[in-house]
Image (cartoon, rainbow, N blue to C red):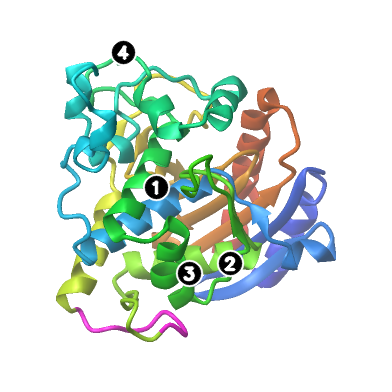
Amino acid sequence: MELVALKAAFEEMARFAPLQCVLVSRSGDLIGEYYAYESVKSTAINIHSVSKSILSLLVGIALRERWLTDIHQPIADWLPEYFDASIDGRKKSITLRHLLTMSAGLGWIENPASIRRLWQSSDWIAQVIGLPLVAIPGRQFAYNTGLTHLLSVILSRASGMSTRMLAESYLFGPLGIELADWKTDSQGYHIGGTDVYITPRNMLTLGQYLSNANAKSYLLPGASGDRGSVSHAPMGSKAMVLDAWLHESMKAQIELRQPGFWHPAYRHYGYLWWLRKLQSYDAVVASGYAGQLIITIRKLGLVVVTTADDTIPFTEVMKQSNQIEGMVEDLIIPAVREE
């Protein structure tokens, strides 16, 4: 019955031309998938800002491994050469938590022009830290890809390996995910917040891990553990840190008080996760440009992955992404609930 309802939902969604795929998993099992064309299934795509949520997971791993000890630590501790006597002293109060909640207070408007300036810079770190301080750190949400790039640099420096190597050794490897590519900045640091390339099925694997780990059924082993799959690991001290991080990172950490380019249903932000209601259910969303999405609804044991055409103009991005989330809410959730 559920599969029949899902098939009807997929047929309705297929009418939306930009949509490239939809995958639906319940209680860890793939129960339906739609691809606009066959090659989508095996093609690694740029998941855009879904990458930011991956950085959140890597912070949890860094805490577990004790490379990071406190998210309230000032970022100047990890980037001291950028915080000399000439800098606005108030910036020295910016912490890792401010990066995770997009609340560093730096003047940035997320649009193609700001991204272009960052991409063209010879020193991305200096470009971001050099932005004017326009709000007290921690007070106001302001979406900023530059902040997550700083987070990637800090993860690399703290762990002693590239962010890509960290992800492959401690996250993607244990989950059996093949990372096709992760672009770098002009200094060789892996871009924090976009330009990670994995397949839709790999996105689903991440979502299934999140759904299960959030329910405390599954825990990632360390780098020295079994890398073949997610395992029912014992609740050891390291595992507990990561599990506690997942729980905390998917809770509301900052309120979205002002409208932005994000979906109007997003009212709170976790540690690089969007939080919203889908129908009456609490949903955690990793959201990327133009409708690259991983949506988890713990109460239903549901994971939904979508990918879509990302060649559209920036002015159309919010509309397209909102339409896709609307179809998940209006078509996929009712189909899954139909027993």
* Crowd band around label 4 with a 10 angstrom C-alpha radius: few (<14), some (14–19), many (20+): few
Query: What number is the disc on residue 196?
Result: none
**Residue 290: image location, x then y, percent:** 65, 38
Q: Which mark is residue 202?
A: 2
Give the spatial CA distance, label 3 vs label 2: 9 Å
Q: Give the image location of residue 125, x and y in percent.
A: 40, 33
Give the tally of numbered discs. Answer: 4
- Asked whether the residues under the numbered discs 3 and 1 touch, taking CB atoms below 8 Å apart as contact, a structural biologist would say no
Circle 3 residue: 172
Q: Secondary structure at mark 3?
A: helix
Q: Give the residue at mark 1.
A: 152
Three-letter residue code for mark 1:
Ser
Q: In screen coordinates, is 245 left or right of 165?
A: left
Mark 4 or mark 1: which comes first in sequence? 4
User: What is the spatial separation of the Cα atoms under label 2 and label 4, in whole angstroms?
Assistant: 39 Å
Looking at this view, is 214 or 222 the one in front? Answer: 222
Q: Residue at x 46, y 33 (%)?
A: 124
Packing grade of label 1 (10 A; few <14, some 14-19, many >=20) is many
C-alpha separation, residue under disc 2 versus residue under disc 1: 21 Å
Q: Earlier in the sequence, mark 2 or mark 4?
A: 4
The answer for how far apart the CA atoms under marks 4 and 1 are is 23 Å
Quadrant in the picture for residue 104: top left
Answer whether residue 339 is visible to the viewer in this image.
no
> Which portion, as a residue range, is magenta?
227-235
Determine contact: label 2, label 1, CB under 8 Å: no
Label 3 vs 2, first from the N-terminus: 3
Marks 2, 1: nearer the viewer = 1
| Residue 187 screen position, x and y as percent | 48, 42
Nearer to us: label 2 or label 4: 4
Q: Are marks 3 and 2 in contact (CB under 8 Å)?
A: yes
